[in-house]
Amino acid sequence: MRAVWRRFRARLPSRVRSVVDLAVATVKDSGDDRITGLASEIAFWVLLSLPAVSIAMVSLAGLLDPVLGSDARAQLIERIEEIAAQVFRQQTVDDVIAAMLDRLLVEGSPSVFSISFLVAVFTASRILRVVVLAVTIAYDLDEERPTWMARVLGLVFSVIGLILGVVLVPLVVAGPQLGYIVERRWGLAALPLGEIWTIAYWPVAVVVLTLVVAALFHWATPRRTPFYRDLPGAVLATGGGLAVSALLRLYTDTAFGGDAVYAPLAAPLAILVWVWSVAIVLLFGAELNAEIEKAHPSNGWPPPRRRSPAELGASGLARVRRFTGPARRE
């Protein structure tokens, strides 16, 4: 089998051979790093923190009442349900997502400065701490940062994410209608802003999402490459996430539609599988970036070789001796 593969590979053009080698190395390294297990850990923390993140986002929407109107939170919830309906079956949206968000709207959300909101931010930071560790492993790097720094980094990423949420909430709430809203508010009816934004809405959303993923790859690792070197994996992760969402919608419509025996389990299973699948393609994008760096190193790469358990044990013993001093003889 290997001989057949070698002959097939030798007949490929050099550029095609490089792409094939890159794809094979990425798949192999993904298996070695057990990205499916890392994705499971990410999915667990995402689902555990989902109520807290929902509270934080709905609270932030309240800051935009002067801009978007007094019903900004209701508009945000309605828009989230519309987007979720593109990924999940309507039953999943109604039973889980809409029920949780509507309860937040009815009972009221805590203010941005309340203790509940701060707890929500702290809980959400655990997601990003796990993501940072998983991306570091995918990049074949050793975690050189102390534990407290990893915690602070996760908290900083959470705050940055919430700030981005404040900026992006108007785009989510208004959706493709943002151009028409700007025309009415600013008296720019002579300009075709509504038509332009309706066409550009989803491309802009995809580009922004890709840049956010690239920024995560760039800042999550202890050793950074130039930002543009993180874009290939970000493009793969974004495109893979969209493809996974479409395939999951098709699968759930087929497997859980009608009077299927497992129809009552469709809602929680669909959300769990979606988060897990998106986490896999995210880490696969990180693996792609790592393989590109191995094939074409930039400044500071390739990363230092991972030490064996014996070497790690010797290093730990040396640290103990350094702090405790030489052994005393009785």
Image: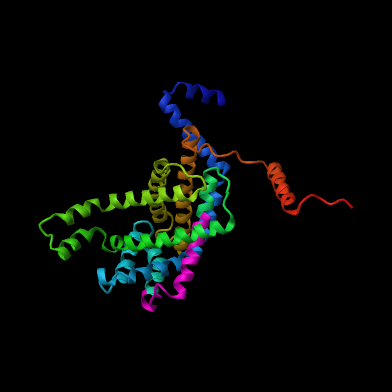
Q: Left or right: 260 with respect to 85?
A: right
Between 164 and 11, which is closer to the camera in this rendering?
164
- For image coordinates 53% across by 50% down, the residue present is 134
Instruction: Identify the image quadrant of residue 163.
Output: bottom left
Residue 3 occupies which quadrant of the picture? Answer: top right
- Relative to 114, say whether 36 is above or below: above
Q: How is the image coloured?
A: rainbow
Q: Position of residue 207 (x, y in %)?
A: 32, 49
Query: Disc count in the image?
Result: 0
For residue 310, side relative to residue 82 (left or right): right
Depth order, front residue of 6/268: 6
Q: Is residue 304 magenta?
A: no
- Looking at the image, the residue that sits furthest to the right is 330
Q: Which x, y percent locates residue 290?
A: 49, 40
Q: Is residue 287 above or below residue 111?
A: above
Q: Is the stretch drawn in magenta largely helix, strand or loop?
A: helix
Camera-side residue: 164 or 198?
164
- Can residue 282 be seen from the camera position used here? yes
Q: Residue furthest left?
A: 190
Residue drawn at the location 75% of the way across and 50% of the way down: 321
Quadrant of the snapshot with the N terminus: top right
112 falls in the magenta region: yes
Q: Residue furthest bottom?
A: 107
Pinpoint residue 51: horizontal percent, then vertical percent. Answer: 45, 68
In this rendered view, identify the residue nearer to me: 124 or 36.
124
Region in magenta:
105-130
In the image, what residue occupies the spot 55% across and 47% down?
A: 137
Residue 262 can be seen in this image: no
Q: Position of residue 263 (x, y in %)?
A: 45, 62
* Residue displayed at 87% across by 50% down: 329
